[in-house]
Amino acid sequence: MQAFKHITAVAASLPVDNVDTDMIIPKQFLKTIKRTGLSEGLFYEMRYDVEGNKNPDFVLHKEPYSHAEIIVSGDNFGCGSSREHAPWALLDFGIRCVIAESFADIFYNNCFKNGILPVQLPKEQVAELRDVATSENPEITVDLENQTIRAHNKEYAFDVDASRKHNLLNGLDDIGLSLQHVEDISAYEASRAQHTPWLF
């Protein structure tokens, strides 16, 4: 998993509450278990019409937002079904951070497991950052190590669980965490094989 420490990037404003996982990645794109190629379906029903033509008014089809790495949205981002394809699609597009008033729990957890930083801020601060995202200079700096966001000479502090912060800073998903103990695991397996060989 790619580590997240510090990024300065274009932020795209998505001023919508209750962005559910079906909006993020519709069900027809869930046939794959690969984490690549899903950016095609990201926000599909907002990005394209029923005939598959681009919606030129959608923010991610405009410059410089087609290269955005940050999304600033509204309340209850990532609600709906628990599909892990949602953070996969965001990451495949290049989104590394989502800033919102609140997140659905499962989506929030899945972000950390896939190298995306979800940042929860008060409504007024989110609104200010959406204003930044629609300004002539839509760049925002997100610093996980210091737990700050900087934009237009203003700084915002955010909270993050210490263990999730550690894992994201070091690029550790669940498998990575397990592999930190590979010597202990190997020793345990060797001991089990010696004492209960019929299990192996």
Image: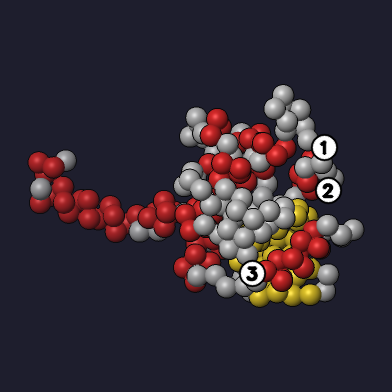
Is 160 positioned to the left or the right of 176 in the image? right
Q: Read off the residue under disc 1.
A: 56
| Figure quadrant of residue 154 | bottom right
Q: Where residue 183 appears, x then y in whole percent?
A: 32, 57
Kind of residue at badge 2:
Pro
Q: Where residue 50 appears, x then y in whole percent?
A: 70, 27
Q: Counting other residues with Cα less than 10 Å from the Cα at mark 3, is it few (<14), some (14-19), or many (20 or more)?
A: some
Q: Counting other residues with Cα less than 10 Å from the Cα at mark 1, is it few (<14), some (14-19), or many (20 or more)?
A: few
At a point 66% along the width and 50% down the height, the residue shown is 95
Is 177 positioned to the left or the right of 186 in the image? right
Q: Read off the residue under disc 3.
A: 121
Q: CA distance from mark 1 to mark 2?
A: 13 Å
Q: Secondary structure at mark 3?
A: loop
Kind of residue at badge 3:
Leu
Location of residue 2 with respect to 40 vertically, above or below: below
At a point 76% along the width and 28% down the height, the residue shown is 53
Q: Read off the residue under disc 2.
A: 64
| Figure quadrant of residue 71 | bottom right
Q: In which quadrant will I find the C terminus?
A: top left
Q: Where residue 85 appears, x then y in whole percent?
A: 53, 41
Q: Secondary structure at mark 1?
A: loop
Q: Tell me the mark number nearer the camera, choosing from 1 and 2.
A: 1
At a point 83% along the width and 48% down the height, the residue shown is 64
Q: Secondary structure at mark 2?
A: loop
Q: CA distance from mark 2 to mark 3?
A: 24 Å
Q: Where residue 113 appears, x then y in whole percent?
A: 49, 54
Location of residue 140 with respect to 154 vertically, above or below: above
